[in-house]
Amino acid sequence: MKEVICTCCPKGCHLKVDEANGYQVTGNGCQNGAAYGKEELTHPVRILTSTVRAEGGQHARCPVKTAQAIPKELLFSAMAALDGVVLHAPVKIGEVVMHNICGTGVDVVATRDL
């Protein structure tokens, strides 16, 4: 039995996930918590937020994020891939900075205008 704190809402339910019984979740206050608990043990995913270098604008770095969650085990590889990105102003919020990061099918987008 594993314990997980749910991050679906501010309530922060303390979930207990029983791996031996088909990842049955207890302690959740809603169905979102039940799905989160199972997913966290079977296939954890995260939204990656970071910054990349930027040239020709007011700021030296531009904040970015993945458009959807990517597998947790790919976070360090994705960060390494973003290390080589250099944007050139102007950049618009929502503009794709990198397509298909680490073969996930997920794009990285700018979260600020430059």
Image (tube, rainbow, N blue to C red):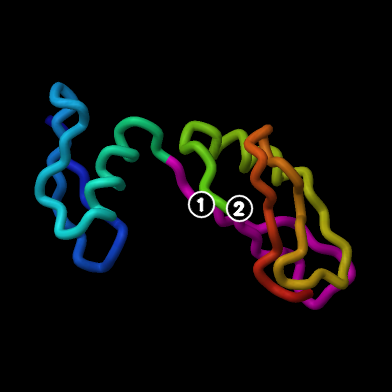
Q: Amino acid at mark 2?
A: Thr
- Asked whether 85 or 32 is in front, the reply is 32
Instruction: Provide residue 59's location: percent of width, then percent of height.
Output: 75, 73
Q: Amino acid at mark 1?
A: Ile
Callout 1 secondary element: loop
Above or below 85: residue 9? below
Q: Residue at x 50, y 37 (%)?
A: 71
- Asked whether 68 or 52 is in front, the reply is 68
Q: Residue at x 68, y 40 (%)?
A: 101
Horizontal relation, residue 106 to residue 44: left or right: right
Q: Marks 2 and 1: CB-CB under 8 Å?
A: yes
Instruction: Provide residue 57's location: percent of width, then percent of height.
Output: 84, 73
For the residues labelled 2 and 1, the Cα–Cα distance comes to: 6 Å
Callout 2 secondary element: strand
Q: In the rendering, which numbered label is found on residue 47? A: 1
Above or below 26: residue 94? below
**What residue would you read off at disc 2?**
66
N-terminal-most mark, 2 or 1: 1
Q: Which residues are magenta?
A: 45-67
Q: Residues within 10 Å of mark 1 (few under 14, many from 20)?
A: some
Q: Residue at x 16, y 35 (%)?
A: 24
Q: Residue at x 65, y 60 (%)?
A: 64
Q: Quadrant of residue 90?
A: bottom right
Q: Is residue 18 magenta?
A: no
Q: Quadrant of residue 103?
A: top right
Above or below 68: residue 59? below
Q: Which quadrant of the rendered structure holds the C terminus? A: bottom right
Horizontal relation, residue 81 to residue 10: left or right: right
Above or below 21: residue 32? below
Q: Quadrant of residue 4?
A: top left
